[in-house]
Image: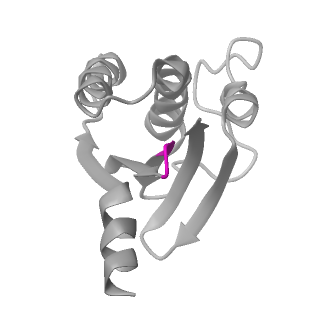
């Protein structure tokens, strides 16, 4: 039994990376580059890296445009029995505007597709509402 537990532990690898999202112009592209480097260091399969970068961009942009600061990105990579799951989480302090209000200069023809993009790319996704705000998350699974 102890040998099996040790083998299970050896076959399961989990790493995590956390970084704040500064509410400044250019933050999303800077963090996206950082995420690319982190995923390369973790040897995340190429099949999900591009999708992951797009999901990261969409969730971070949503936090910058629609939520109160502070915001934080958390990535976790779990490798188990040859499969890999990347979880992308963005936590913010909650909505900046009341329901139904749009930010000044918001053009619905050019915005508002982020949730659809995340839904299309992620294996699973959701929103967790908690006392500190919202956490939007997405899992991307590689074989």
- Asked if 57 appears above or below 85 in the picture, the reply is above
Please state which of residues 50 and 26 is positioned toward the viewer in this rendering.
50
- Asked if 130 appears above or below 120 in the picture, the reply is below
- Residue ranking furthest to the bottom: 1
Residue 60: x percent and y percent? 45, 34
Residue 82: x percent and y percent? 49, 43
Please state which of residues 61 and 36 is positioned toward the viewer in this rendering.
36
Residue 26: x percent and y percent? 29, 16
The residue range painted magenta reads 81-86
- Residue ranking furthest to the top: 110
Q: Is residue 83 magenta?
A: yes
Q: Quadrant of the N terminus?
A: bottom left
Q: How is the image coloured?
A: one colour
Q: Quadrant of the C terminus?
A: top right
State the predominant SS element of the stretch in magenta.
strand
Q: Residue at x 25, y 48 (%)?
A: 18
Q: Residue at x 55, y 51 (%)?
A: 136
Please state which of residues 40 and 36 is positioned toward the viewer in this rendering.
40
Q: Is residue 12 visible?
A: no
Q: Residue at x 24, y 44 (%)?
A: 20
The answer to which image quadrant residue 113 occupies is top right
The answer to which image quadrant residue 141 occupies is top right
Q: Is residue 79 visible?
A: yes
Residue 68: x percent and y percent? 42, 50
Q: Is residue 118 magenta?
A: no
């Amino acid at each position: 039994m102890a040998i099996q537990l040790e083998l299970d532990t050896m076959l399961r690898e989990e790493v995590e990376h956390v970084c704040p999202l500064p509410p400044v112009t250019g933050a999303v592209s800077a963090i996206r580059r950082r995420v690319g480097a982190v995923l390369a260091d973790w040897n995340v399969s190429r099949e999900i890296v591009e999708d992951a970068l797009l999901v990261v961009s969409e969730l971070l942009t949503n936090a910058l445009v629609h939520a109160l600061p502070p915001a934080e990105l958390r990535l976790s990579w779990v490798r188990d029995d040859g499969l890999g799951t990347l979880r992308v989480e963005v936590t913010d302090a909650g909505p900046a505007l009341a329901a139904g209000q749009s930010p000044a200069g918001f053009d619905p023809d050019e915005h508002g597709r982020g949730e659809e993009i995340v839904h299309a790319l992620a294996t699973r996704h959701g929103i967790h509402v908690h006392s500190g705000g919202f956490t939007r998350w997405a899992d991307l699974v590689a074989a």
